[in-house]
Amino acid sequence: MPAPVTVSIDLPHDQEAVFDFLDVMANHESFNDHLMRDWELSGPARGIGSRARVTTRALGISDVVDLEVVDAERPSRIVERNVATKAGRTGEGTYELAALPDGGTRVTFEYRWIVAPRLDRLTAPLARAYIRRNNATAMRRLAEDLDAHLLGHVDG
């Protein structure tokens, strides 16, 4: 099994506000649409059981991926299970939120394989680098989206 991939970002927002944003599945589209497209949401809007079906295109291969929040602990953790139909890949993405001394929040996202197709195992360094790069991009975009979202609430 390939080793998990972890990325982190420090945000100036308090942990509750960051959790509230990440807890809504629809909010994930804007910071992940560089990798996941054609979002179809189902289940509750937030929390355990919220789901999305997306189309991915990775390394020239398209696939349908089903995402579902399978665990959450307010305000510190959200776990999403994802199943890529064609690839035969099952993984988990875990958001860990930790309060920073200055009132901000460190968001750490870890992707780990639960079921890794043969191709992922054979190309583990390439697969891990690809996921790390795309997840780092998602974290930077999360920071931008969260800023805009929270500023919208302050101004609105």
Image (tube, rainbow, N blue to C red):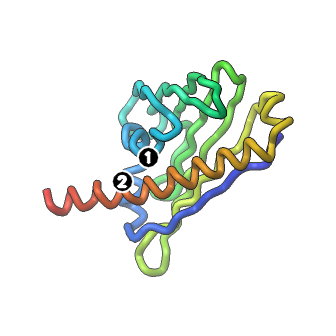
Amino acid type at circle 2 is Asp
Which residue is the extreme one toward the right? 122
For label 2, the crowd category at 10 Å Cα-Cα, with few meaning under 14, some 14 to 19 and many 20 or more, is some
Q: Name the residue under label 2.
A: 145
Q: Nearer the viewer, residue 125 or 6?
A: 125
Q: Could you tell me how far apart the alpha carbons at marks 2 and 1 are, in whole angstroms?
A: 7 Å
For label 1, the crowd category at 10 Å Cα-Cα, with few meaning under 14, some 14 to 19 and many 20 or more, is many
Q: Residue 102 carries which label?
A: none
Amino acid type at circle 1 is Phe
Q: Position of residue 73 (x, y in %)?
A: 51, 51
Residue 121 vs 53, above or below: the answer is below
Q: Position of residue 12 (x, y in %)?
A: 40, 71
> Tags 2 and 1 in contact by the CB under 8 Å rule?
yes
Q: Which residue is drawn at 48% across and 37% down?
A: 48
Apparent side of residue 118 relative to residue 149 in the rendered image (left or right)? right
Q: Which residue is drawn at 59% across and 24% down?
A: 62
Q: Mark 1 points at which residue?
A: 31
Which comes sooner in the sequence, label 2 or label 1?
1
Which residue is the extreme one toward the bottom? 102
